[in-house]
Structures are given as C-alpha cells and as structure tokens.
Image (cartoon, rainbow, N blue to C red):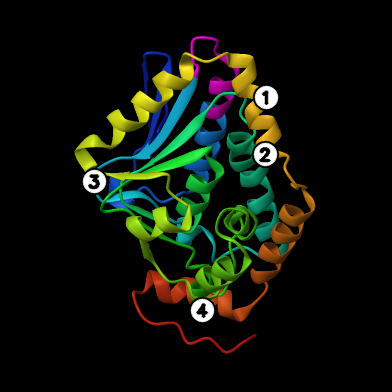
Amino acid sequence: MAYQTLLTTLENNTLIITINRPEKLNALNSTVIHELGKVIDEVYENASIKSAIITGSGEKSFVAGADITEFLQLDSSQGEALARNAQQNVFDKIESSPKPIVAAVNGFALGGGCELALACHFIIASDNAKFAQPEVNLGIIPGYGGTQRLVQIVGKGRAMQLVMTGEMITAQDAMQYGIANKVVSQSELLQTVKDILQLIHTKAPLAITKVIECINNFDHTQQGYDFEIKKFGECFSTEDMKEGATAFIEKRKPNFKGN
C-alpha cells in the first residue's frame, strides 16, 4: 500500500515504518495518524510480517510532536475526539499489537512523538535522541497516553516532574529512567533493533503474543486513558491553549493567563 507520509520496507519479516515529513521534523498531523492506523492494521493482518520498527526520516527527529497548526480551530469536544481517535486507532493498537513493535528513536521524540515511542513495546535510542512531554507550554496536556504510560515506566514522581515542567531529557537520561532500553550511535540504530527482532523471531510467536498481553495487562485499565482523553479535550476550550498554539506558530513566548 502506498502512503503519503510513511515509507515502508519489509526486511526479514520486519516491517520498517518511517514517518517521512522531514520538513516538519516528522510531526504528527491527521494524515500521519490515519496512515499509521492503516499500517498497524497491516502489521496485524499480514502473516509475512512478524514484527515492526517505527522510526523517523533523517537524523534529527523521530517525531517532534503534533502539527500544532491543526489545533487552533478545535473546541473541547473536537479536542477530545482528536485524542480518542488517535488513541484507539494508533497508540492503543501499537501497544496491544500481537507482534512486537519497537521504536527506533533517531532524534527528537517530543509530545506526541514521545507518546508514540512509549506506546511501542520498547525503545532503542540513538545517542542524539531527546525526549519530552512539553504540552504544558501549549496550554494543554498529553493526549495520546503520555500521563499513563510514562508513570508506568518512570514512576509517579518523575512523571509528574517531566510532564509539569515539559523539560527535555537526553537519550542517556532516558535510558537511566527506563524509557529507552539501549542507546547506540545513529549509524547503529536500525541494525541494533533489527538484530533484537531477529532474535525474537526465533521464539514461539504465540508465546510472544501472550507475553505482550500479560505485561500490558499488569495493573492496567482503560480508566486512566479515558480520563486523560477527557482532560485533553477540555484544554481546547481554554484561551491558554489558543495562546500557546498561536505563540508556537508565531515563534514567540506564550503569555498564559490561566483561563
């Protein structure tokens, strides 16, 4: 299948999915979200695909957040629908995939990009990778599972700090926090992930599926995600959200007023 914003290559039963919007640092827009949903369906359905890698084009960015230009016209209910659609059709499907899906983070993984990586079964990062949930700078919160998945990985206190400050952390910090499993050079990144997946391919596929199911269901409910989606949608009725998004587009500091 041909995609506008994705490049796909099947190699040794691993589908390499490359988000290909380098001029926008591979930011997520509605087309990317739609096409990611379609390609994840292909991972589920195509028997020749045993695993998948998600990465970004170029050496600068994995996914540098969402495309903020799409946010300004949304009200509360539309913001909630945006988050729910992406969660159900992309992020939850990645997390629940019966086949391993690994993030090869090759640069900036910010906002929705960090959440996309967190939804994968694990992360391998290049040494220039940077991670952040900077949504508070736009007057919103993570809407694609960030407040839920990050807590599971790094713990409540560290997640609180990262999400409330929006601070960016290095690949080495991400590995120390448990976000990334391994940090390698940019040139080694894809091959490292391929090698890990080839090892997994030697294991019993049904057992791998059950491993994913069991680990995903450890003290894990939909309630937290639904609550996050609702709160994400509520942000779109605030003036601060409009100010944050406008300031981002105009390349200036936002003037938040708490309304």
Residue at the (46%, 74%) spot, across then down: 246
User: How far from the left and from the top, in percent, is residue 182?
Assistant: 37, 44
Q: Quadrant of the N terminus?
A: top left
In the rendered image, the residue lying farthest to the top is 48
The circle on residue 59 is 3
SS class, disc 3: loop
Whichever of labels 1 and 2 marks the residue nearer the N terminus, that label is 1
List the residue tagged with mark 2.
216
Structural crowding at the residue carrying mark 4, measured as other residues with C-alpha within 10 Å and reported as few (<14), some (14–19) or many (≥20) = many
- State the CA–CA distance, disc 1 to disc 3: 34 Å
Residue 181 visible (yes or no) = yes
**Viewer-nearest of discs 2 and 3:** 2
Magenta residues (range): 40-50
Quarter of the view holding residue 184: top left
Rounded to the nearest angstrom, the CA distance separating label 1 from label 4 is 45 Å
Q: Secondary structure at mark 1?
A: helix
